[in-house]
Image (spheres, helix red, strand yellow):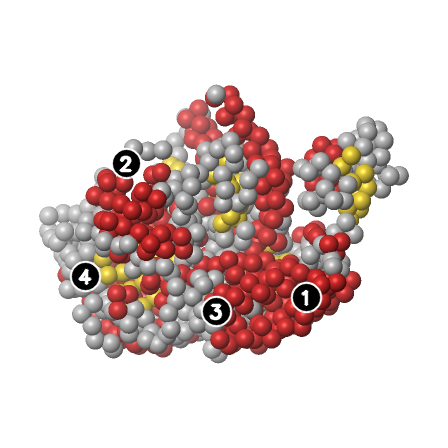
Amino acid sequence: MLKDNLFSRCCDKCWHSSEKACPDYISCLTQGPLCHHDEKCENKKKENISRITLKSMEKPMIFMGLGTCGMGAGALKTLEELENVIKEENIDVEIRKTGCIGLCTLEPLLDIKMPGRTRLSYGHVTEKNVRKILNSVINGKPEEENLIGQHFSDGDENWKNVPGFFDHPFFINQKRWVLKNCGINDPVDLEQYLANGGFLAFEKILKNELQASVCDEIEKSNLRGRGGGGFPTGKKWKFALNTPADQKYMICNADEGDPGAFMDRALIEGDPYRLLEGLMIASYAIGATQAYVYIRAEYPLAIERLIEAISNLKKFGFIGENILDSGFSLKIKIKKGAGAFVCGEETALIHSIEGKRGMPRVRPPFPATRGLFDKPTIINNVETLCNIPDIITNGYEWFCAAGTETSKGTKVFALSGNLNYTGLVEVEMGTPIREIIFQTGGGIPDNREFKAAQIGGPSGGCIPPQHLDIKVDYENLKTVGAMMGSGGLVIMDDKACMVDVAKFFMDFIQRESCGKCIPCREGTRRMLEILQMVTSNPSSDSSMNSLERLSGIITLEKLAEIIKSTSLCGLGQTAPNPVISTLRYFRSEYEEHIFNRKCSAKVCKELLTYQIDEDKCTGCTLCARVCPSEAIKGAVKSPHYIISENCVRCGSCLVACRQNAISVY
Amino acid sequence: MSNISLTDILKEFRDPARDSLIPILQREQQQRGFISKEAMIVIGEKLNLPVSKVYGVASFYNQFRFNAPGLHQIQVCRGTACHVKGSSTVLDSLEMDVGCKSGETSKDGLFSIEVVACVGACSLAPVVVVDGEFHAGMDSTKMRKINKTLRKVHNAER
């Protein structure tokens, strides 16, 4: 940090500091000084704020998107080259790291802001073009290639003929509340978070509000749990508040186990302070003095940023003993998950923190009355907590103004699969799924047909084309056999096989079943076996196999119902959903697999046959060379052939062949 | 890997109770790459827990492994998005190329394969993580190329 920063004392009259806290410390830092009147000090503060909010800057600033997705796309190589260029050409700029803005398709992203001009965003910035882009902007003639747009801001001069960044089709329909700072700010820079109004909500409740009134405010806002269940958050808090106990716990559930969901990761990587502020407000509201963030070990970068953010908060006295002289004390601990899907379930998560096998238990008693170490415990999802600070600041009416009758506010979705723009989007509740896919997501690539949208992970369901106009809402989605879930939205085109998708989820669930209750442990395995039989190699069929397959199919739906109604925890009760939902909308595909023993999407490998067209094959040997199982034989310049028994149906030959001689059926 | 012994790891935890079990196991695995039988006995003694309980917890979670990992650790993401984009093909050809199944270490001790539920980089699917580095948009050919380079580096060093 710079020598003179937001936290440095303006003069000797200022009596509070991080060591000697006062209830107005935060607003004094950002809007002050409040403790004494001195124009000089006021100007000093204002200068600092305008430096941090980039209203006044001395040299160009470069923002590099360094979330996990950015790094996966090669952002570190770009950064390395960028640093080289700056050194070689002796350019005076400052480089800052940001999280992910959500437009993962165009990563690595790089933003440049010249003093007094708006911020420019470039996509696909690699080590090859970074020099060109940097020089063009510094010379005042921004390169048009790869330019996404400019971020309009008050007091900065616009670039001519450059579209607005948030007018990009990916952003234009979004309502970015929770994601506001993601990809814009330096995630671990506390100054920047404060200068943009951060922690004012926390200060406000510590100073003026009773615990019950905070719970009331959240209850009135109708905020519902974003982790999947959709239980009203304020109501949940009240249960814990009204349970007398010497110790209460607040837990943030960041064990994002749903395959296809990554919003919690992106939120923590991009704006950890927002989450922590939400967590701190929630802890105050229920009277917890110890908070945990239970986060997946698979998210190393998120953990790293969270650790840094927490240590910054400790340093400036925002967490610890007697915070801001309010009498409220709070400790925040990070608990790393160890890779168990079931730990997303509340009671299992609690067992995991206690150091036990992460198995759910019967509820009630609910964790809100008896949870971690048998004390009242509230568990909230990352996105839920990220919503809290703004609700406190703007009031519940503001929050209620957005959304539908039963679902208020916004929802973050992780778009992935066969889409033109994959990434993280935040839309208002009530937005039609069609709009999310075809407007925000940019539609299906290669002019292919949309087949289904899988929503809600393994507990959710598929939305077929005929239900695309359904609006995002907790209740609405249930009517078509899907659910909100945590917000993973995987789009599938006509190349996807729905039987295979169902099989994939059953495989996942039976592997992740904790094994405590029999319907889930045994039932999901049986269901998987039935699906495996449906997609098994027809050449190994005996009459016994066929009979078993038939009996399996007959019982599949009944089995699903039993698992649903008799499993212990929410995960077991929703485990058969992928099968039920695909059966409901894609029954003909199942029938094709069962009766014709074919997979027209060409996904179910065992049902496929690869063949080389002798007339087309020129004997270039390319296919034989790429074949991993040496199943392709033939002499050079004479037609090759595939030995069916050796073929593992990997499809490498199909990709390699330049003559289009290989057919699959 | 590193020289921090289990005794030193245990010293990092002040008055460890049951809730320290998973963090201790995680530290141990971070240092040595796996959890040995001996380590579980020592940890059990320290926490006053039967070894069966320690093993029960360690074997419950996917993160912990009980055999030495290969020199290069390859994690194949099997999330929904990766699956839709063909990660099973990548996994199959990887297993064939390296010569061991997921959860195992190859005979030459060079590679170990692990299947992870989701690494949370769905928009880059299919994703393979090699020694902590993310590789986006994988297919069997790209995978074989990476392995080839790793082997080459290894052979050159020898």
Q: Nearer the viewer, mark 1 or mark 2?
A: 1
Front residue (pair A520, B133): A520
Q: What residue is rendered at 27% in x and 40% in y? A: B6
Q: Are dots 4 and 1 in contact, CB under 8 Å?
A: no
Which residue bears the numbered disc 1?
A548
- For marks 1 and 3, the one nearer the N-term is 3
Residue B38, given in percent of the width and then of the height, sits at: 31, 42
Q: Which mark is residue A567?
A: none
Q: Nearer the viewer, mark 3 or mark 2?
A: 3
Q: Is residue B106 left or right of residue A616?
A: left
Type of amino acid under label 3: Ile
Q: What residue is rendered at 74% in x and 58% in y? A: A541
Q: Are dots 1 and 3 in contact, CB under 8 Å?
A: no
Q: Secondary structure at mark 4?
A: loop
Which residue bears the numbered disc 2?
B4
Q: Secondary structure at mark 3?
A: helix
The residue carrying pointer 1 sits among few (fewer than 14), some (14 to 19) or many (20 or more) residues within 10 Å by Cα, namely: some
Judge whether residue B118 can be spotted in this image.
yes
